[in-house]
Amino acid sequence: MPKVVVASYDAMGGPEVAAMASDGYTAGPTDAGEYRILYCGQHSSRAYASWSKILWGSELKDDGAGNLLVKHQGKWQSLGKLTPVTRKEIAEYHEALYGTKKVPDKWVFNDFGHITCYFYKDKNRDGKFNKDSESIHAEFFHTTPVNEAQQAQGLPVILENSHGCIHVKPLDIDGMRKKGYLNKGNRVVIHGYAEKTVAFANDAKGRSPFEVHFYPGLNQIKIVGVR
């Protein structure tokens, strides 16, 4: 059956040429290839532990003695035991994002936003995740704190280059999940930066099975279905 584009979304990958980003981490091109969606969930990062070890939306509170507590892994814990980030830095980051210098009651600083969708290379092409021989790819679909704040305040959501992951707008990743575009097992194709011609016709009547095609050279995700 012919394949057609059923939806398009703005998206940003890493820069085509690797370089040191302003945060001190290397940013490089998003890996081209074919993958499959494994699952979507909230991300806790060891690589970016200062702001991203704590899950998005985790509750924050003051213990009454000047210490901040966070609800982490189902229990209240001292924030200082999980991250070196200070109360002052939290308030300043909140001001940069939302315009008010304060410690919020929820953690809105995780670099991967409110949801992350993971994919893997299906080496034997059996459509299943074989944990003994396959692993989650180190790049994901996710949002960012800046875009989450823009969305929450009704401001234009402006995507920026990632370190290699695929940045999408908060409402878009929610919409893609709701429509089944990011369901487990769906095929993901990350195209090369030079690929700037979409090889499918536009047709909103396309249907499942859906494929997610990311064109980093176009800053676009194309959802492809069958007609």
Image (tube, rainbow, N blue to C red):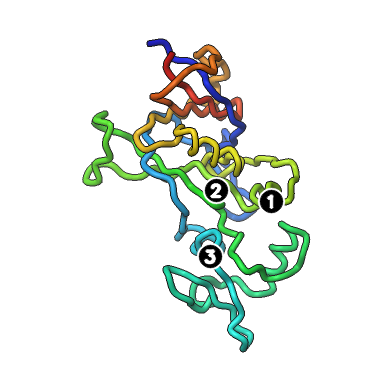
Q: Determine the residue positioned at 53% across, 73% down.
A: 70
Frontmost residue, 8 versus 92: 8
**Label 2 crowd (10 A; few <14 / some 14-19 / many >=20):** some
Report the amino acid beneath label 3: Ser
> What number is the disc on residue 92?
none
The answer for how far apart the CA atoms under marks 1 and 3 are is 17 Å
| Label 1: element kind | helix
**Tags 2 and 3 in contact by the CB under 8 Å rule?**
no
Quarter of the figure with the N terminus? top left
What is the quadrant of residue 202 in the picture? top right
Q: Determine the residue positioned at 24% across, 30% down.
A: 126
| Label 2: element kind | strand
Task: Name the residue beneath numbered marker 3.
Answer: 58
The answer for how far apart the CA atoms under marks 1 and 2 are is 29 Å
What is the quadrant of residue 75 in the picture? bottom left
- Residue at the extreme right of the image, as rendered: 99
Q: Which of labels 1 and 2 is toward the front?
A: 1
Residue 63's place in the image compared with 40, above or below, is below
Report the amino acid beneath label 2: Thr
Frontmost residue, 168 versus 218: 168
Task: Name the residue beneath numbered marker 1.
Answer: 152
Q: Determine the residue positioned at 55% across, 68% down.
A: 59
Task: Name the residue beneath numbered marker 2.
Answer: 26
- Residue at the extreme bottom of the image, as rendered: 65
Q: Determine the residue positioned at 72% across, 66% down.
A: 92
Rendered location of residue 45, percent (x, y): 47, 58
